Each structure stands twice: as C-alpha cells, then as structure tokens.
Amino acid sequence: MSSTSQKHRDFVGEPMGDKPVTALAGIGGTLGGRLEEEGFDKAYVVLGQFLVLKKNEELFKEWLKSACNANSKQSGDCYTCLKEWCDAFL
C-alpha cells in the first residue's frame, strides 16, 4: 500500500460537496488555476470528467496532462484520489 498525503486522506474521508478543484490531491494552485481557466473550477467537475472517461486511469491521466500540464505524479495522485473517493461514496 502506498502512502497518501493528508490532503488525499481529507478528500477521500468525506463527501465532496462544493470543494474547489485544488482540494484534489495532486492539484495545487498553479494546476488548479489552469483547470479553472478550462472550466473545471470545482472538484465535482473534474469528477464528472473522470466518470465520463469511465474511471480509466490512462485516459484520465492523459486528459489531466493535456488540460493543465500535470506531470505523472500529479496526475497519478489525482487519479488515485478520485478513484478512492468513488470507491467510498459511489
């Protein structure tokens, strides 16, 4: 089992509500700003894209890289965060 950040644990531990996109693990201020410019201002909007891509890890990571120039660690952290949230709440 890989270790996760406090940010990851906080996100996965409760309902999403209206959390900002920067609440997602792997998404800081810079990437969050880029995503907001693309219309992905809330975590639930990114979740929608995650679900549209059928929770496919490779497709989601590629999308995140193209949408906000996330690197492989950032996109992996965000994918894992959303996957574990879905496992817990969907």
Image: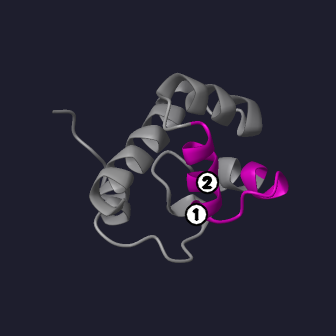
Q: CA distance from mark 2 to mark 1?
A: 6 Å
Going 48% across and 28% down the picture, which residue do you hit?
A: 57
Residue at numbered disc 2: 48
> 60 or 8, which lies in front?
60
What's the magenta region?
34-53
Q: Are marks 2 and 1 in contact (CB under 8 Å)?
A: yes
The secondary element bearing badge 1 is classed as helix
- Outermost residue on the bottom side: it is 17
Q: Is residue 42 visible?
A: yes
The image shows residue 77 at horizontal and vertical percentages of 43, 39
Question: Which quarter shows the N terminus?
Answer: top left
Q: Position of residue 61 (x, y in %)?
A: 57, 29
Mark 1 is surrounded, within 10 Å at the Cα level, by few (under 14), some (14 to 19) or many (20 or more) other residues, namely: some
Does 19 sit left or right of 84 as displayed? Answer: right
**Residue at left 36%, top 55%?**
85
57 w.r.t. 46: above or below: above
**Lateral position of residue 21 relative to residue 57, left or right:** right
Label number found at residue 44: 1
Q: Which mark is residue 86?
A: none
What amino acid is at disc 1?
A: Tyr
Q: Is residue 31 magenta?
A: no
- Which quadrant: the C terminus? bottom left
Prevalent SS, magenta region? helix
Tell me the residue at 65%/36% (across/down).
Answer: 64
- As for residue 52 lying within the magenta part, the answer is yes
Residue 28 seen anywhere in this rendered image of the structure: no
